[in-house]
Image (cartoon, rainbow, N blue to C red):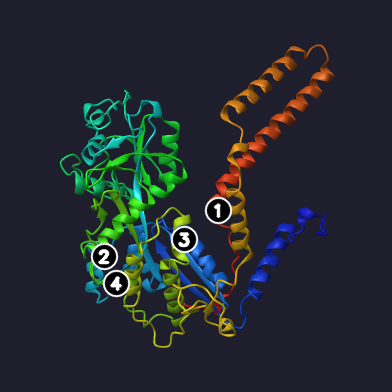
Amino acid sequence: SGSGTHLEHNTCTLPAFRKMLSLVANALAHDASKPVTVMAGSGTTNPRRMFWETMEVMQCMAKEPLHLTYRAVGSSTGQKEFVGPDDKAVKYDSKMQAFGAGDIPMSEDNFNALKEANRTMLHVPIAIGAIGVFHSIPKDELGDDGELNLDACTLGEIYMGTITRWDDERIVKQNPGMTAASKIYVAHRIKGSSSTSGFTEYLEQTAPTCWTLGGHKEFGKDKFGKALPQGDWPTGEPKEGSGGMSEYLEKRAYAIAYIDYGHGDDAGLTAIALKNQDGHYVVPTPKGIEDAATFAIKEGDDVYPKDPTDSFHGRNLYGIEGKDTYPIVMTTYIYLAQDYTKRAADTAAATKAFVEMVISPKIGQPIAVENGFVAMPQELVEYSKAALAKVAWPADMQEYFFETEDKTAFTKETTRKEEGMLPRFLSRKRKCYGDYERKQILEAVEDIDPDTFATSEELDAAKAQIGALQKQIDDNDGDDDQTAAFAKAGLGLGVTGFVFGAAALAVALTKKHAVVAKPSVKVSEATVVGGV
């Protein structure tokens, strides 16, 4: 009817009502007399979950209302938005971006463009990751040590299309006892990615005579359809994203693909052991990845310049020395302006506090580990703290403090009576229910006993029993239509329950890394501070 009393015509449905209550509760949790401080970053996609979760935690820790966002658009776009407007018609201002982020250093062209504009930027390392190379050769066809071992030259020749079979003598020589005799099915990324940059730059640096196409973010054609100077990939199947690469390995035996370590490890893929600088074959491990950063920071400024405002172009963690060091390690950076004095003071304060949280071993680094990265060694944390200390902040900026032993993000939390209730104190003793609920879900998933899962043999047996029952029903269909109908209905319910049970288990497992989002406060433009 037109009265609006029926549920289908009522805009205040139960989910909408719950959402409204969440918004009201969230608004009441903060000081309503204060305007919302906005901070927005953009850049590489790899740390997006780490950033989003840290931002949510920070919003929950704050007494005053914050609105923190990160646009995952890729390292190149993050750099371009950091440098400044490309299209004057858009009316974009680089001050709209509180920080940029990339898995690669600022490009030489962009760094020089900043210098020409009398702007100084600095790199703040915030996480360590790696590019893993994975395969799908059946385990019983691998060599005597149960792993697939490859040096950089062999890997380069596979991706050049020079080596096309797993029984090639150059592969067998590195893998005694290997019996795989199949064609090699190669996968590569279809669009530009930092994974492609890391992988091809490693090959260029380590085996330039075997991989001759150089290090690039993208092959083929640019976004305008124009052929790139380096041309297309010499061989392989194009796949989109880490998910596409993983799916290819899962469905295609005898395949090879490069994927960021965190994604590949979470997907349970089998890593190739790459020959490192010391001549050892190593698979990516947290220790082997961390060792690269530790060695680099101790050996001088070849990778991390003493002055973080210097150019980082051409500096990387590929082929770092060490017995257990993995050879394709990458640093993820936050790009900061050296001068924030002309930025909105509240946004600047939020930016400083956020970066402190991200590099903190007490807050951000555990979140980084949860999201596929390796915790930075303490030496690199100290480097990042020193870099952050070089930033000039607004004179009228009211800094955020933390309810910890020394009021920074880097020490143990403690109760600071009365002081912790001051407006600019961020406290881990304040939490959002979403954060609590997420931890409960993760603990529940960790407590799942894998021995209670049905084995593949048991599932196959159940399917066979269902098939036999279906055949028996079909054979008896003409004898008693009503009985057959009831039997089919029962069988259908049984199959449905089986399917939903499997689906529920899959959902539970895939939710292990899910983030329960905290509802944001909807505010008018008049109440927003910062952002420009």
Helix, strand or loop at mark 1: loop
Q: Amino acid at mark 4?
A: Met
Q: Residues within 10 Å of mark 1 (few under 14, many from 20)?
A: some
Q: Is residue 26 visible?
A: yes
Closer to the camera: disc 1 or disc 4?
Answer: 1
Instruction: Tell me if residue 165 comes above or below residue 417 in the rendering.
Output: above
Please give the label number shown on residue 366: 3
Q: CA distance from mark 3 to mark 1?
A: 15 Å
* Rendered residue at 46%/55% (across/down): 371
- Please say if 144 is above or below 328: above
Q: CA distance from mark 1 to mark 2?
A: 35 Å
> Which of marks 2 and 1 precedes in the sequence?
2
**Disc 1 versus disc 2: nearer the observer:** 1
> Which label is found at residue 121?
4
Q: CA distance from mark 4 to mark 3?
A: 27 Å
- Residue under numbered circle 1: 514
The answer to which image quadrant residue 78 occupies is bottom left
Residue denoted by label 2: 110
Task: Tell me which label, 2 or 3, sits earlier in the chain.
Answer: 2
Q: In front: mark 4 or mark 2?
A: 4
Residue under the image location 49 percent in, 72 percent down? 412
What secondary structure is marked by label 2?
helix
